Image: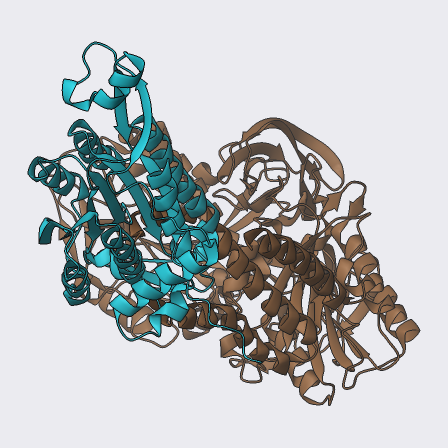
Amino acid sequence: MGWLTFLNPAFLWGGLAASIPVIIHLINRRRARLVQFPTIKFVLRSERRVARKYRVKQWLLLALRTLVLFLLTTALAEPVLQPNVGDLTNLNQPRALVLILDNSMSMAYQTAGMTAWELAKEVSDLVLQELRPQDQAAVLPLILRGEPPQAFSGDRAGLMQQVGELSQTYEPAGFVLPFQRAYTLLKTSDAAKKEIVVITDHTRTPWVGFEPASLKVIDPQVRVTVIAVGPTTTPSNATVQEVRVDQQAVVAGVRTKLTASIINFGMEQRQQVPVALLVDGQTVDQRLLDLPQGSKTEVTFDVAFEQPGDREGTVKLASDDLSVDDLFYFSVPVKKALRVLLIDGDPRTTLVASETFYLRNALNPERAFGAAPIQPRVVPVEEAERVRLEGFDVVVLANVRNLSAALRTRLTEFTNHGGGIWWFLGHQVDPAIYNRNLFDTPTRTLPARLGPPLERIDAHAAALRGLDAGHPILKPLIERGLDTLAGVRVRRLFSIETGSLPPTTHVLLALPDGRPLLLEGTAGQGRVLLYTSTADVDWNELAVTTGYLPLMQTGVGYLARREAEHRFASATRLPQPIVVRLSEQQKEALVTITDPQGKEARVFPLEQHGQRQTTSSETRLPGFYRLHVGQESGVVAVNTPLDESDLTSIQALDLGEKFPGIPFAVVDWERGRPVRAPQVEPISMAGWFLIGLLVLMLVEGVLANRLR
Amino acid sequence: MAEPANYFDPLTLSKLSTLLLRARYVVEGLISGVHTSPYKGFSVEFSEHRQYVPGDEIRHIDWKAYAKFDRYYIKEYEEETNLRCYLLVDASASMNYRSQGVSKFDYACYLAAALAYVMLNQQDLVGLVTFSHGIRQQLPARSSPGHLRAVVDSLEQTTPAGDTDLGRTLHHIASQLRRRGLVIVLSDLLDEPLEVMQGLRHLRYQMHEVLVFHVLDDDEITFPFTQLTQFEDLEDETRVITDPRAIAADYQEQMQQFIKEYETMCRRQSIDYTLFNTRTPLDKGLLKYLAWRGA
């Protein structure tokens, strides 16, 4: 349908003439002459019998005459029926048209063998074909590469070529900026009629937060037409929200749990959906999942990465109509082994008497130094001064009396690169020295201020209290039951000045009386753990409980993990760039990024927040990006934007509410149907009105004749 | 040469000064046109003999004829007594309607005066009753020459007013007229026909001869109105606004039915019914009377 407009609207004032018959009727009624008449009873009887029917006919006649006059004046105003959409042919007035083409990711949705993007281009051609010589148009993709058009063009072929050269992106869309550009561009046009035609799908996402009133350049005279392609109802679509590696650092050969969160954005439940896990392109696991509509489902894979290095993982969902988001890419830095430096502050001549004896056995119980996932190396403090800490993931200090300034500096650098430190205390530890050198300094590596040691000679064996059940260190223990930490007798430990705890420090384990036993904090980019008693059995019996081994292993893994994550950059979603953090040593390094299509590009570092980093703007495709920083390399996964996977449709009515006071129309277009308005000339309705007028006059004549 | 005035035309007559004059013009005009005198048989004149039959009064036996023929013959006369006529003129408000110069009441008065003139010239006795809701004025039947003046004066002094209760009034008059005679009712009869007929039947029951001169205006018969009109009743305040074109046909049909009903009912009661449109020349009424008188 279209809307009715008038070429000579001034004639519509003549519509008042339609009231003339009514006025005449009222005047005649007032002028009814008075006759004194004897046989009024016959008049009354006739009035009752026949005048009612006559009066109905009279009213009908009155209505007909009113309608006749109304039609006459309306016909004189030359009514024309305007098409609804893309109306480029409104009479002879020149028009300026901005065609906004949605090239966001959701347009990759397939329907009837074609993507919404292909349909959109088809509709664009139809709209542009209807341009008349006096019309001008500009093509504005929703996601623009390069400069926006600065002027209109009347070259239809050129405009259609522009549309043909546009490509679809994997990026999210928002209509605020394109409308801003369109209104700005339309302001430069002198055309009498201006219009913005948006060709998009039915998804709600790009309209979220869109308020034309907030656009400073809005022109309420500009007509807005939205041509929506694709299905009008919300289609089914599922995607992976995230994949997370549970708990520990990933070590080659060690089974690791990967949890994938899958969202079904559709309105229907999907059953028995195959979900596959691929590592380096090989399927290693597959599950069948039921995906309830509109909610998130988690699936956990148990996988062992055979090779160290950055492994390319992919979670693949069974293909649906929006296939681009069915693959989720993630990169897993797999270590050959966790290297742990154990600095023994109280080495003895016998291993069993050494401070680190239990620690070393707990971390590598099989003592298989070649292939063990955790490879501890025990050194005394003096030797530690000479060891390169960069070769280790975690440094454990057990009952160390004092640390030289040089070692403290190296530890600080170590944590700044994400390395983790685990402090164990003992009789050699002087809390004043620890607090001064390790806590009360800008480069703090101790998570809490130590108090004096507490003697608990008569302490009984008791269960430890886990204060954060969901913490990665405690979670495996709690899943097995906290009795693994039961029966621990702590005879001596350092007190903690809990009143001065930094905000990043948390107590993870405590004695039944509440005294902290294990605390977690941060230092630089790394994590720090503080055990307030000894690593061996001198002050407590933790080392001889069943919970000791898993606690030490998970603790070390926890401390090392962040270092692995933060080596280069985090995984990202389009269109966010890849941000590469460079160390001081890497600041002069050559940084290149190779995209999923194999195209290599060099990126240059820039300073931000006092830290050198490299930002890549070359992330236009989802997939694995290979980073080369000097001699090192890594893999970063880039995925499609999550919002674009939400294909929830927006109703035309809701869309209309976004354009109050603006001439606005929505057209649901399907392939095979013409875009009516651009193809149809305005239809003059004056002839029909005149035909109607003649018919009414004929009826009026017959009726009036019968009434005589 | 000016056309001679038609003195049977009510409109022409209305221009004459007095009702008496109008009556005389009507009657004299009619008589001069007929040539032969209509005045006959009202004196005690011999008419014929017939043979005596038992039951005849002996005093009517012609003894001379008996002497000649030795048979009894009865001597018959044209008329033995004068006619006693009562003119009943409706003077209700509805009679006041006029579409032209002559109202129904005027027309009835012309007719009544003319009839009185004729009758008194024949030595008949003429009485007059004007009525509306009841009897308004009543003159006893007399035949003196000066009685015509009294009749005419009475008519001239009467103004139509009040509603009609014709049926009851006729009953009342019938009960007052003891001696049989001719009763001429001049009215628009705008009352319930059945009740009116009850009254007329009462007159017939009293052995009166009854003539009904039904006087209606031309508008009442033809309903010629065309514009939107507010009709108001002459006798009460009933009002109605209507488009006359819508109801004209139905009205005319009702009126014809109304007239037909009176015609039929009068015929059944041996009452001579005549419809007078106020545009009808007045001689029609006189001729009707004379025809009846001569029958």
Question: Of A706 and A333, which appears nearest the observer?
Answer: A706
Residue B102 in the figure: left or right of residue A141: left
Question: Of B144 and A247, which appears nearest the observer?
Answer: B144
Q: Quadrant of residue A205?
A: bottom right
Question: Of A62 and A178, which appears nearest the observer?
Answer: A62
**Chain B appears what colour?**
cyan
Q: Quadrant of residue A157?
A: bottom right
Residue at the right extreme? A157
Q: Quadrant of residue A268?
A: top right
Question: Of A270 and A85, which appears nearest the observer?
Answer: A85
Residue B210 locus on image (x, y percent) = 26, 37
Residue ID at (70%, 84%): A185
Which chain is the one coloured brown? A
Residue A155 locus on image (x, y percent) = 90, 78
Q: Is residue A585 visible?
A: no
Residue A447 locus on image (x, y percent) = 32, 62
Residue A563 in the figure: left or right of residue A329: left
Residue A99 locus on image (x, y percent) = 74, 71
Residue A159 in the figure: left or right of residue A150: right
